[in-house]
């Protein structure tokens, strides 16, 4: 049996790809960081989440190579480097240098670059990356505080960051099917092309990619290519209930929102119409986080209900956030909110809470850490890229949502459509 090892450069990005793998037939386990032990694992795909998207490049390379080595020790023989569907990186990397290091470690010279995720509006055409109807470089990503994306051309981006040569297999070539794509990959390899940017405008293109790359040692991309890879593998392996091990369990649920994205603001607003909610105040977090956390846990306990769990939210709109940041400082206020949520979730766990629905990538990372969640089974998908996950060692279930993911009714649907 082939086993896929995925190296993801951030936490919710890892859950995103794991979810697509499961939904398309591959039982999957996810680890936070490179585990220290070697467990006997039955999953067909193993995902490791790193924090290597914007750290210094040499650290990203070291972490990725350590993950590769561990995955090889678990019997993985095919590998997937997962980065953001908006190719979040700087002129220096880290996508290019990590790709080069993984290729070298595997003794390979060629891989593909496939960030497309059409279901979430990311497509690639003639090697240019689009976010909905805008070029990447004209989308909000051009203002990203850490990895501003001011070029949309993936050939140029890769050529600047990595050592080798890049070329495109375009949509028209993908329309010709998997055999044609494989032949084109071989031709480009003979010409010394190391990174082949793959167009994808819709899911059929991703299925064609997956079929063409079934035997490729290393692929790289967003989570969309995982749909193709999993389908190509799952038809061979006949995995019919891959998400079973990750189905949510546990009696008491709470919703924690630490994201200030536009989508999370809408989700919080919608959910507040339905369920008890309590705003988290930054000045109280800064004042005495521990006693404030106890107070908030008491409130959650008093508002426990089985169908629509109480919501704690620090979510603020852009104007409110700006005012808070001016008053207390951006780093200080966000750190205070994160520490508060860490204390709240730790305490709720000790009081018997077992289901946590969390909004925000950083917030999710902090909550997973405070709950001591290091490895989980991936369960059913709530929205594209957001699954329920279940801790391997403790009776805890989590839904961890990237800021911009999910629809307006996400919080309610996470509970009502997936009762424990
Ligand atoms: N009211 C607030 N005032 C100041 N900082 C806040 C407030 N609410 C949340 N934060 C901080 O904002 C940050 C939000 O980051 P997080 O990654 O959780 O969400 P996101 O950026 O929307 O998600 P993603 O990374 O998945 O796109 C966290 O550090 C959080 O603590
Ligand atoms: O690929 C994506 O868009 C997400 O999984 C992600 O990485 C967001 O940070």
Image (cartoon, rainbow, N blue to C red):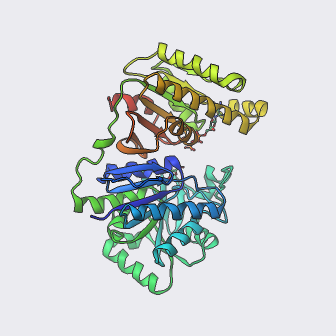
Q: Nearer the viewer, residue 386 or 318?
A: 386
Q: Residue at x 58, y 28 (%)?
A: 343
The x and y percentages for residue 175 are: 35, 69
Residue 375 placement, left or right of 259: left
Whether residue 202 is visible here, answered yes or no, is no
Quarter holding the C terminus?
top left
- Most extreme residue toward the right is 327
Q: Where, quadrant-wise, is the N terminus in this rendering?
A: bottom left
104 or 113: nearer the eye? 104
Image quadrant in which you'd find residue 224: bottom left
How far across and down, in percent of the image, does residue 173 sit? 39, 73
Compared to residue 181, the image places residue 373 above or below, namely above
Vertical position of residue 37 compared to residue 182: above or below: above
* Residue lying at the far top of the rendered structure: 302
In the rendered view, does 292 fall on the left or right side of 14? right
Is 137 on the left-hand or right-hand side of 178?
Answer: right
Across and down, in percent, residue 248 comes to 34, 34
In this rendering, the answer to whether 400 lies above or below 140 is above
Q: Position of residue 125 (x, y in %)?
A: 49, 65
Picture quarter containing residue 377? top left
Residue 63 visible to an observer of this rendering: yes
Q: Quadrant of residue 320?
A: top right
Q: How many marks?
A: 0
Seen at 46% across and 72% down, the residue is 111
Indicate the quadrant of ligand 1 in the picture.
Answer: top right
């Amino acid at each position: 049996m082939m086993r896929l090892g995925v190296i993801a450069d951030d936490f919710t990005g890892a859950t995103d790809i794991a979810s697509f793998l499961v939904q398309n037939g591959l039982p999957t386990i996810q680890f936070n960081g490179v585990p220290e032990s070697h467990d006997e694992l039955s999953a067909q795909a193993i995902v490791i989440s790193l924090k290597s998207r914007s750290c210094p490049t040499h650290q990203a390379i070291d972490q990725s190579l350590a993950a590769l080595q561990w995955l090889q020790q678990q019997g993985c023989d095919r590998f997937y480097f997962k980065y953001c569907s908006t190719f979040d990186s700087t002129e220096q990397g880290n996508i290019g240098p990590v790709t080069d290091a993984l290729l070298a470690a595997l003794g390979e010279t060629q891989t593909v670059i496939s960030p497309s995720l059409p279901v979430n509006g990311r497509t690639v055409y003639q090697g240019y990356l689009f976010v909905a109807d805008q070029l990447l470089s004209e989308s909000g990503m051009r203002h990203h505080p850490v990895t501003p994306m001011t070029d949309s051309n993936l050939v140029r981006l890769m050529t600047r960051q990595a050592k080798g040569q890049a070329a495109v297999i375009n949509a028209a070539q993908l329309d010709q099917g998997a055999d044609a794509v494989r032949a084109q990959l071989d031709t480009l390899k003979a010409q010394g092309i190391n990174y082949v940017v793959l167009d994808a405008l819709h899911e059929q293109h991703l299925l064609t990619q997956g079929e063409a790359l079934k035997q490729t040692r290393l692929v790289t991309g967003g989570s969309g290519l995982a749909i193709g890879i999993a389908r190509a593998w799952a038809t061979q392996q006949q995995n019919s209930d891959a998400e079973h091990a990750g189905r949510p369990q546990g009696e008491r649920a709470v919703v924690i929102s630490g994201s200030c994205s536009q989508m999370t603001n809408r989700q919080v607003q919608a959910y507040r119409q339905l369920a008890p909610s309590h705003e988290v105040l930054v000045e109280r977090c800064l004042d005495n986080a521990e006693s404030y956390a106890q107070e908030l846990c008491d409130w959650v306990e008093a508002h426990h209900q089985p169908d629509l769990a109480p919501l704690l939210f620090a979510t603020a709109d852009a104007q409110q956030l700006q005012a808070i940041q001016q008053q207390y400082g951006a780093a200080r206020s966000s750190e205070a909110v994160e520490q508060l949520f860490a204390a709240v979730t730790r305490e709720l766990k000790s009081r018997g809470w077992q289901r946590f629905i969390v909004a925000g990538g950083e917030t999710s990372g902090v909550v997973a850490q405070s709950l001591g969640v290091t490895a989980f089974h991936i369960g059913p998908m709530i929205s594209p890229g957001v699954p329920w996950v279940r801790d391997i060692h403790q009776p805890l279930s989590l839904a961890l949502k990237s800021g911009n993911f999910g629809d307006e009714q996400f919080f309610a649907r996470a509970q009502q459509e997936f009762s424990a």
